[in-house]
Image (spheres, grey):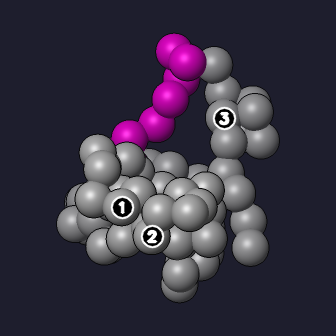
């Protein structure tokens, strides 16, 4: 599993790309997921994994993730 960070892309905060651009730069089958821990506030996960729940660090709460709408 791969994790994407601004440091990996060597981008400053002034150079942050939009979602559609990020997937094109990184290549592969990357997707955004809306996740929450035990029904708490939602946050976004960007990964090439088919199961992003392992990236949420929600223990012991149960992570719930749904695919984010595709942009562009």
Name the residue beneath numbered marker 1: 38
Residue 39 lies in quadrant:
bottom left
Q: What stretch is highlighted in magenta?
A: 13-19
Q: Which residue is drawn at 53% across and 71% down?
A: 52
The answer to whether 62 is drawn above or below residue 42 in the figure is below
Rendered location of residue 7, percent (x, y): 75, 33
Q: Looking at the image, is 13 positioned above or below residue 43?
A: above
Residue 20 appears in the rendering: no
Question: What secondary structure is marked by label 2?
Answer: loop
Work out whether mark 3 precedes mark 2 in sequence or the reverse, and give the earlier one: 3
Residue 57: percent from left, percent from top: 61, 56
Give the residue number, with chain letter if any, for mark 2.
62
Note whether residue 43 is visible: yes
Q: Name the quadrant of the C terminus.
A: bottom left
- Residue 6 relative to residue 44: left or right: right
Q: Is mark 3 on a helix, strand or loop?
A: helix
Whether label 1 touches label 3, CB < 8 Å: no
Which mark is first along the chain, 3 or 1?
3
Mark 3, other Cα within 10 Å: few <14 / some 14–19 / many ≥20: few
């Amino acid at each position: 599993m791969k994790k994407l960070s601004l440091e990996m892309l060597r981008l400053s905060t002034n150079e942050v790309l939009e979602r559609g651009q990020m997937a094109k730069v990184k290549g592969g089958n990357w997707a955004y997921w809306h996740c929450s821990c035990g029904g708490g506030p939602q946050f976004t996960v960007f990964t090439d994994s088919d199961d992003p729940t392992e990236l949420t660090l929600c223990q012991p709460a149960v992570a719930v993730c749904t695919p984010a709408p595709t942009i562009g």
